[in-house]
Image (cartoon, rainbow, N blue to C red):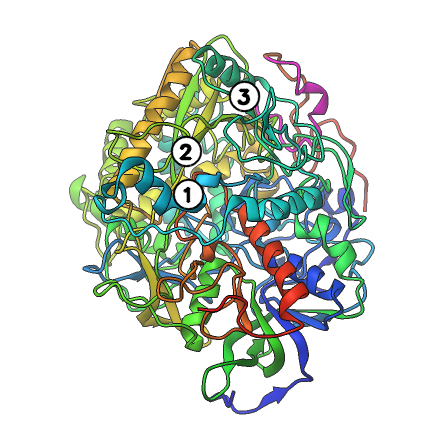
Amino acid sequence: MSSKVDLDRRRFLAGGAAVGIGGVAAAGIHDGELGAPAQTFRGAVPWQEGTADVPPGVSGSGYVFFTPAEALFIEAAVGRLIPDDAVGPGAVEAGVPFFLDRQLAGPFGRGDHYYLGGPWPKGTPEQGYQSRFSPAQLYRAAIAAIVSYVGANFKGAVFGELAPNDQDGVLKGLEGGKIDLDGGVDAKSFFALLLQNTKEGYFSDPIYGGNKDMAAWKMIGFPGAHYDYKEWVARHGERVPFPTVGFKGRPGWTERKA
Amino acid sequence: MDGAQGVTTILKPVDAVLVGFGWTGAIMGQQLCDAGLNVVALERGPWRDTATDFATGFAQDELRYMWRHHLFQNVTYDTLTIRNNVGQQALPMRHLGAFLLGTGVGSGGVHWNGQIWRFLPSDFLTRSHNQQRYGKKAVSDYDLSVQDWGISYEELEPYYDQFDKLCGTSGKAGNLNGKIQPGGNPFEGARSNEYPTPPMAQTYGPTLFGKAAAELGRHPFPHPTGNLSEAYVNPLGAQLGACTYCGFCEKFGCGNYSKASPQTTLLPYLMLKPNFTLKTECEVLRVELTPDRSRATGVTYVNSAGEEFFQPAEMVILSAYVLQNVRLLLLSGIGKPYDPASGQGVVGKNYAYQTMSSVNVFFDDKIINPFIGAGALATVIDDFNGDNFDHAGLGFIGGAYIAGMVTGGRPIEMIYTPEGTPAWGLAWKHAAAKNYLRSFAISVHGSCMSHRGNYLDLDPTYRDVHGRPMLRMTFDFTGNEHRMSDYLTDRAAEVARAMNPREIKLNRRTGSFSITPYQTTHNTGGAIMGDNPSDSVVNKYLQSWDVPNVFSMGAGAFPQNAGYNPTGTVAALTYHAAHEITTRYLKDPGPLVRS
């Protein structure tokens, strides 16, 4: 199983092997698709000690996909999709823009699990996503088109400068398909993807760059990646007092040095 | 055999070749190898094992498995096209949505929920039973094309039992040898044995559901499950552990050896057999036939390096997913393709699905803890499934089980918000924060009858990475399904209200079938079984009427879909076919049923 990386789990997850977007292939993430070597098995269950199909976490800081202008739009937009207040973090505070950046710069952005071949008729709503754009291409084209729409309709302003009410108005226009975007971008498709990806960044494990300090999980009461709730099954209606935990543990755990 | 790319390597002949290696391939492989056959399995995805691929240190990853489709078929290389009716142009499913197709060793058997059901005795007689009870028009009035299966529950019972023993299914019998048992499903067909392990302990949500259902006079019972309530060693010596209720079953692999899968129940035994060979990253392109098309000679496949092989075999078992089996039949010219205009032909006929709806229940005063869950952790009522209730005057046939079900609390997918909550903004966030711990869903798992306009064929435009036509699905929910689903959703709402929640929300199945929202991966039909070659593709032993050394496994054999999860019936049909192959066919290879 040479395509799967050697694993000392906690060390891997805690630091050294956490791969950046360029490191995904180098880490040998095996997606089980065409291109992996064909194998023949006979007479044994193949298994190799210390190997695992580890998750492709991200590292670093700053944007590698978004241009500064795109980042301004994204930060403002996701801040309206999930605003910050005392109840819980907003999408910006949870690190969603960084999560989106790394997703779009990686396999998801490239459309690794999308069929993008033609022809490309528009189709019916029931036929779902019908575009030749990969997610990264869709974000790029849609943000440019929104910037141009906002400039034309709000006296040259950019989205981030609009009043929250106006920002919400633009987002609702996209959501309902009431705004026509240039460049062959379907506004509804883009909004649906942006909202979905925003919630993914807000609620996924922090190894992917969002859900900072697991604050979104804490807000709703999800204790995270616990493995065993057996003793709580029959304790109906009680709050489970487990501390919130992610793959890399939780604050207070001592990270082992590689 | 002489593909355009040039050289095809001809391999050593084998007794049987398995096309696809999920549940049906693994069961058939074990049965045929135990009978002494030399068997090769060809799987187009990768090898996967529990310790390497689903380790508990990282298995509970909602983003990677559910939303990035890490274990699922990658539609980049091969998808299908979809339309609601023949008047539309079918377009490719560009991203998985309504159903989540499997790939790799174990396939959907890795990332299923572990819901193990048997169909009702009357489900196997959909046409004759309903006509007898409700009159001829009960079926023809709705333009349905439902058929009897050509097999009875009683014939299948020993094989349902065999699958329960393989999995160690946890549950409580409701009907043991004809005697109704307290605590089980009183509507089920007679079982020859109690479940191998006791039912799972029920969490708060399912418990509240069961109490309310009983107060309404319904008959609640624990959902039969392949998430095991206690440790179990199956007849092949494979060991399963007790489920820890981590809440990551469906769409995920189980790191705890607690969910029945090919990996946990069959592979530890089968992989050691010297007469079994598994080849991964090898995709079968077509079944090859003799010039007179009376016999299969083997299969042509291509590996991930692009090398093409011909694997000669005495017997070809199509054990891929429904959609691939039907496509291979069509691509290989086995059986006459179905034509919806004339109603003639059989391959692709009677494609069906599952009609899903739900009711959300919201409490102020009750902490549900939805993250304590398991794939089949539910309390269920079967009072309104199949023909367990009088359909006179209702305008439909079929039904659903209704389940107070908490499979997990994965927050990207499973936050329920009350009626009228916007999808984003502060109001959404506040609703999520308020309701996550205090809500759950009642699932309405409805049947889907076959209809003459719903079918599978080959797409005229779109092709896969190998240049083969994609499969084309033409499907929509019909009036029968909408009426059934509305009636059943109302019954679920009655139970919901009887729990005295703050509020409920009905998620009805409205409008046309859409590829976008996840519903369920229970695609059925297209290679249907029956007692006559004029209206079915395979006989009751899943043997092709046209090419008797080809057998087509899986839910493609369902002439219509019942209101239950299909895996139990899929497995039972496989064991039933394997039994006939090993005891009768091998001695005298040829048609097992004379047409």
Check contact, mark 1 vs mark 3: CB within 8 A: no
Q: Main secondary structure of the magenta part?
A: loop
Residue at mark 2: B400
**Left or right: where B482 falls relative to B365:** left
In space, the residues marked 2 and 3 are separated at their CA atoms by 17 Å
Q: Are marks 2 and 1 on the same chain?
A: yes
**Left or right: where B525 falls relative to B375:** left
Magenta segment: A220-236
Q: Residue flagged by tag 2: what amino acid is it? A: Ala
Question: Hey, which quadrant is residue B250 in on the image?
Answer: top right
Coordinates of residue B310 in the picture (x, y in percent): 59, 83
- Tag count: 3
Which one is earlier in the sequence, the residue at label 1 or at label 3? 3
Query: Residue at position x 52%, y 21% from top?
Result: B220
Q: Is residue B535 visible?
A: yes
Q: Is residue B171 magenta?
A: no
Q: Chain of mark 3?
A: B
SS at mark 2 in the image:
strand
The quadrant of the rendering that contains the C terminus of chain B is bottom left
Above or below B33: residue B354: above
**Left or right: where B195 falls relative to B116:** right
Q: Residue flagged by tag 3: what amino acid is it? A: Pro
Q: Is residue A221 magenta?
A: yes
Q: Which mark is residue B206?
A: 3
- Tell me the mark number nearer the camera, choosing from 2 and 1: 2
Above or below B73: residue A62: above
- Tell me the mark number nearer the camera, choosing from 1 and 3: 3
Residue at mark 1: B518
Query: Residue at position x 54%, y 29% from top?
Result: B409
**Left or right: where B259 falls relative to A164:** right
